[in-house]
Image: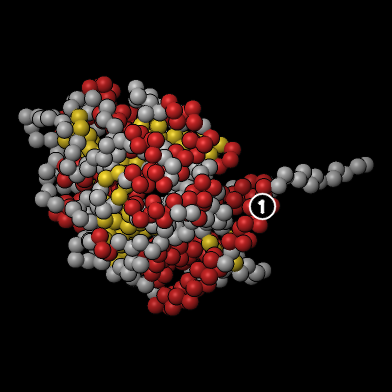
Amino acid sequence: MSQYQRDQDPDIIVGLDAGTSVIKALAFDGEGRELARAQCENHVHHLPGGGVEQSLDATWQAALATLSALFAEQPELAPRLAAIAVTGQGDGTWLIDADGQPVGDAMLWLDNRSSDIVSHWRATSAGPTAFRRTATGLNQSIQSGQLRWLKEHDPQRLARAATALHCKDWLYFRMTGERATDPAEAMWTFGDFRSGAYSDEVLECLGLEEYRGYLPPIVDGSREHAALTADVANAIGVASGIPVVLAPVDMLATALGAGVYEPGKRVACSIIGTTGAHLCVRESARDIILGNHSCYTMPCVAPDTWVQLCSNMAATLNLEWFLKGMSEMLNAIGETPLTPEGLLPRLDRALAATEPGRVIYHPFICASGERGPFFNPRARAQFLGLTTETTHLHMARAIYEGVAFAARDCYQALEAHPEELRLTGGAAQSDTLCTILASVMGVPVRTLSRGETGAAGAAMVASLCLGRHRDLAEACQTWVTPWLSEEAVMPDPDLQNLYERLFGVYQRSHTNTDGFWRHLERVNAEPLRAPIRQQENTP
């Protein structure tokens, strides 16, 4: 633990949130108010065969540039800096060697190459055995399948490695020199949620026992921190020895920052961004649901408390795909393509006036298939019920409705019955989606006035680590409650009645589509035919 001390009483905490495509750093004061922010893009590489990778070095350089920009643009922050908290994208495999150097690029949570391995595990005793310990269903995103894929397809790369990290763990290592991971990702990947330690049984049943030494120590960031190295401190313009806190993985940090934890009230939290994540708190191990092998289970920051999560692979990614396709079509025929400036607010208003429920949309647009509330790497998005009377506005609204139905599907898998839903992520800015989600779920939806709840949740954990609060409940009074909207979006009674009937159609139709997806996969695996060429006019 760092012994960092300073004569004055610093109050600034910086939350560093390393997303898949953007890395953000936000500075907060002791009351949880955002003071400044900076961000840098990070790049993803798509490979043949479903591989999705990211450079460890480039990710670190982007994080370093983000922190440097924050303190360069706001130099008055550096003397007040109390801690830096690190969170980031979950799952994936970030390998380093004994010297701390990257071993190849990281396999991301989007990587689909381990799907066949995971499908085999789930169909044999390995899947249920691992689930009994982790209470987390195996899927194509989790590190265990990716390590097994590397063992079978790239053993030389794995042999050069010494430690298997996740994204935030890699950044924490670069900032402190400490190899570690947080309890959430440790438990859902290779742990026993009851004991809070790694499980040799999980490693053995997955054929990964030889890599036990690759697993880093588990560090609870609400209680422990390490010191910022002098080299990194000089690079970003702050004092060396600043406490660095390994915060929970981004989905948990975001949910904490959005208010998923509120003792005495039955709340849940949906993070609807590129992906959809749906979380609820379990205040006793007896309350953990063990019936759905698509759920994640992780320790919460509060003692003897857990959070369960069910996550869709794609949420707003569906709308981005739809709008991009329309823009490309307009461009191809020589018309002016759509521009993002001001588009979404205008679309939101138009969809609010569009007739609901005209078609059903399954939001499985991610090429990796689906992981929650069911596992199927073959799952594909689809519209049902199109006619000549269907407009593109009907289809766009169906995408909003499909994302909301997917959220309810996940909460049903969690057997969660919240009295209020907390909503964060990019979709929280859509009044239309808030109304649709409230009506689909049948409960009030409350948003927050701050958008970056992941960085705020990470900073809140650092605030706990610094001893500024007695417990998580008290920390939430400072970091969450002031930013909750005073008025919740209530369900629309007519929409609620309609969506109650349509949800059954949504569920039954995707449940009965696996055979179609299987046939489609076989056809797509066949050699491509040459495209039909337009005949040239001859004089």
- Report the side of 413 relative to 242 (left or right): right
Say which residue appears at 31% left-offset and 28% top-offset.
174
Which x, y percent locates residue 59?
40, 32
Q: Quadrant of residue 500?
A: bottom left
Q: Foreground residue, 262 or 294?
A: 294
Foreground residue, 173 or 196? Answer: 196
On the image, which quarter does residue 489 sit in? bottom left
Point 26% across, 63% down: residue: 286
Residue 511 coordinates in the image, percent (x, y): 53, 66
Spot occupied by residue 430 in the image (x, y as percentages of width and height): 40, 59
Query: Under tag 1, what secondary structure?
Result: helix
Q: In terms of depth relative to the viewer, which is nearer, 235 or 72?
A: 235
| Residue drawn at (14%, 52%) of the image | 471
Q: Name the amino acid type tagged 1.
A: Arg
Percent across and percent down for residue 19 are: 38, 41
Q: Is residue 35 visible?
A: no
Task: Give the residue pinned by disc 1.
Answer: 522
Question: Which residue is situated farthest in the left direction here?
Answer: 7
Residue at left 64%, top 50%? 329
Q: Is residue 519 visible?
A: yes
